[in-house]
Image (cartoon, rainbow, N blue to C red):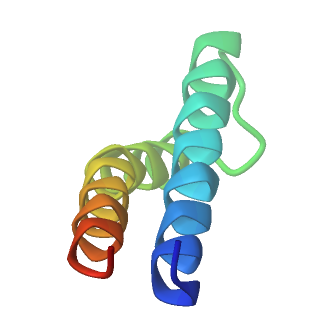
Amino acid sequence: MTPKSGVLLAGSCVAAIAAVGSIFELSSGQPQLGNLITGIILVLAIPLTGIFFYAAVQDARANQ
């Protein structure tokens, strides 16, 4: 694993945690940041999780 792929993998983990947290906040009925901001976080975090993970895998494969 290269430092770049490690950073991308960490970004994927943080985005996944943000997505799961946003889902729980929205399902609670009263999100602390409000429905709009929490929804925006969720909408951005889901694709970023996949993009960062894919980029980390591609970088690790390219540097083997």
**Left or right, residue 58 beside residue 64:** left
User: Which residue is pictured at 47% across the width and 72% down the height?
Assistant: 8
State the image coordinates of residue 20 (x, y, percent, origin top left): 59, 29
User: Which residue is pictured at 49% across the width and 56% down the height?
Assistant: 12
Q: Is residue 32 positioned above or below 21 on the image?
A: below
State the image coordinates of residue 54 (x, y, percent, origin top left): 25, 56
Residue that sits furthest to the front in the current view: 64
State the image coordinates of residue 53 (x, y, percent, origin top left): 36, 55
Q: Report how many numbered discs are placed on residues in the image.
A: 0
Q: Is residue 46 positioned above or below 2 on the image?
A: above
Q: Quadrant of residue 22?
A: top right
Residue that sits furthest to the bottom in the current view: 3
**Left or right, residue 10 beside residue 57:** right
**Left or right, residue 2 beside residue 44:** right
**Left or right, residue 27 beside residue 51:** right
Q: Is residue 10 positioned above or below 36 on the image?
A: below
Q: Identify which residue, 63 or 21, lies in the foreground.
A: 63
User: Which residue is pictured at 72% across the width and 25% down the height?
Assistant: 30
Q: Quadrant of residue 21?
A: top right
On-image quarter of the C terminus: bottom left
Q: Quadrant of residue 48?
A: bottom left
User: Which residue is pictured at 52% across the width and 39% down the height?
Assistant: 19
Q: Identify which residue, 32 or 43, lies in the foreground.
A: 43
